[in-house]
Image: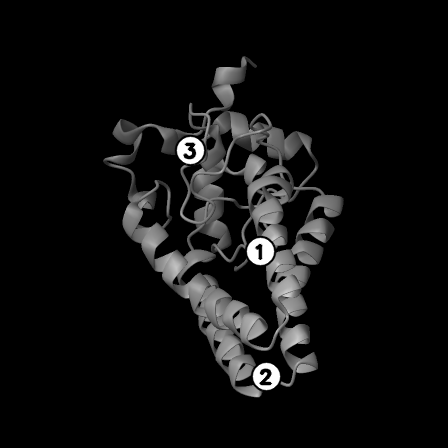
Amino acid sequence: MKPESFIPCNTSEAACRDCPLSTQLKCRFTSRDLFHFLIRAFGFILPAGIGLVVTGAVWAATLWVGYMLFFFSVWEIRILCSHCPYYAEDSKVLHCIANHGSPKLWKYRPQPMNRAEKFQLWIGFGLFTLFPLGMLINGKAWWWLLAALAGWLIFARYLTTRVCTRCINLSCPLNRVPKHIAQAYLDSNAAMRQVWKNDHKPTHPGGKP
């Protein structure tokens, strides 16, 4: 198949107009979705970061910010985002409901994530979450710790109920799209479906029956 045959349907506004999946999946980028995502994400990031600074662990806050820039703009883009249909858009930066504006340093890869990539993703998420929480515990910043934990729980709840249940990055280990909807999306993208089949992945992606 030619490279352009792998371009998924969600990159075309015309293809989405009468598609029944457009109300069940976050097929296209909207600034509203990005706003809601960032509000929840910073509900964790801000109290955790401020807590590190006020307890004197400025070096830890600096290290954490540097890590986030690297992970969300480089590492995660390679192991997760380059598999996402959003990444197939003809642009040099990613227009996404999460990692919006990140540079596309790699080509679009329509095949599912492999086990090594999923393992790396869990490691990356773990460092993002546990490092600041551990430092807050070490600094006995209990109120900031509680605020950060509350923010993380709200963020996680938002992801698992509002984002991951409608995300078209179907091979992400956090994906919770019902299997029949995920399969319907693949059926609308024959080239992508064939790549998944050739990759020996289950023919029914998604996280829920």
- Please give the name of the residue rendered at 59% of the width and 30% of the height, measured from the top-left corner: 109
Residue 183: x percent and y percent?
49, 43
Say whether residue 48 is left or right of residue 31.
right
State the mark number for residue 188: 3
| Residue located beneath label 1 in the image | 65
Q: Is mark 3 on a helix, strand or loop?
A: loop
Image quadrant holding the N terminus, namely top right
Furthest-right residue in this view: 116
State the mark number for residue 106: none
Type of amino acid under label 3:
Ser
State the mark number for residue 141: 2
- Please give the name of the residue rendered at 61% of the width and 34% of the height, measured from the top-left corner: 196
- Nearest the camera: 121 or 44? 44
- Nearest the camera: 163 or 72? 72
Type of amino acid under label 1:
Val
Q: What element carries label 2?
A: loop
Q: What element carries label 1?
A: helix
Say whether residue 53 is left or right of residue 138.
left
- Please give the name of the residue rendered at 42% of the width and 33% of the height, measured from the top-left corner: 188
Task: Give me the C-alpha separation between circle 3 and circle 2.
Answer: 51 Å
Task: Give me the C-alpha separation between circle 2 and circle 1.
Answer: 19 Å
Residue 23: x percent and y percent?
29, 49
